[in-house]
Amino acid sequence: GYSGYLHPVGDGLVLGIGQDATDTGRTTGAKATLFDVSDLDAPTALGTWSAGGGSTSVEWDHRAFLWWAPEQLAVLPFTDWRSDTNAAVVLRIADGTIIEVGRIDHTPDDTGGPVVFPCPLIDPAEGADMLPRPPGGMTLMLCTDGGHPQVRDHWCEYMNAEEVRRYGMEFGVTGIEVPEGAMVAACFPDDRGWVPPIERTLVIGDDLWSYSRNRVQANDMATLTRLQVVSLG
């Protein structure tokens, strides 16, 4: 295997983050290795952690890595391509070993209640020509304030006026008047269960905070229990 990123974690100790590999060089998954580099002429691997698959963005983005020295904890985003899931792995460095403490993720909370659409809905009976069989479950919004607002439990395709003229038929709608700078959003229920990857982590007080495209989240540092979620839209 190899280490794509090295980080000092103590006197004469370096943590390497990269990929495990076969003898022929085929990568097999994310791996962390603790090295004793007190003798630079003869570095020694003390302990390893291997995910058995997947990858971590730390390999190409060093800002994705968190080292919290007071608790001897390393946190790295992890994408498991076998199950198509995203999380952050918390590792403890202790006595020359690497121990997985646990994982945090940004899976949606089961909040219940109705879904709130942040932009006015487009009524097909008022100015929009719908095909006989529009895509099932689709909801159309007209967003005039710019941006791409999120809709809970939905994924949305956003189109400006020109894109509506070109591609509107693919979404079962044509003939919508789109003001300059506005966007039409075609939103569909998201039953895929996909969770966006965690991109950054940091410690505030006794809490481990993490950021992804959809949310900022706080977990208890000791138990990794989810404490607070701030949705981003």
Image: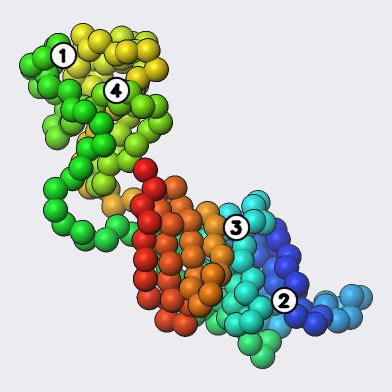
Residue appearing at x 18%, y 45% in the figure: 115
Crowd band around label 1 with a 10 angstrom C-alpha radius: few (<14), some (14–19), many (20+): some
**Is 27 located above or below residue 127 in the figure?**
below
**Is 147 located above or below residue 166 in the figure?**
below
* Distance from the alpha carbon under mark 3 to that under mark 2: 16 Å
User: Mark 1 sits on what residue?
Assistant: 128
- Find residue 184 and name its label: 4
> In this view of the protein, can residue 136 be seen by the observer?
yes
User: Mark 3 sits on what residue?
Assistant: 64
Left or right of 202? Residue 172 is left
Kind of residue indicated by mark 3:
Ala
* Distance from the alpha carbon under mark 2 to that under mark 1: 60 Å
User: Mark 2 sits on what residue?
Assistant: 9
- Expressed as whole percent of the image width and height from the top left, the position of residue 177 reads 25, 10
Residue appearing at x 68%, y 87% in the figure: 96
Q: Which mark's residue is nearer the viewer, 2 or 4?
A: 4
Q: Secondary structure at mark 1?
A: loop
Crowd band around label 3 with a 10 angstrom C-alpha radius: few (<14), some (14–19), many (20+): some
Which one is earlier in the sequence, the residue at label 4 or at label 1?
Answer: 1
Residue appearing at x 29%, y 39% in the figure: 155
Which one is earlier in the sequence, the residue at label 3 or at label 4?
Answer: 3
- Expressed as whole percent of the image width and height from the top left, the position of residue 222 reads 47, 82
Kind of residue indicated by mark 4:
Val
Which one is earlier in the sequence, the residue at label 2 or at label 4?
Answer: 2
Kind of residue indicated by mark 2:
Val
Which one is earlier in the sequence, the residue at label 2 or at label 1?
Answer: 2
Q: How many discs mark residues in the rendered view?
A: 4
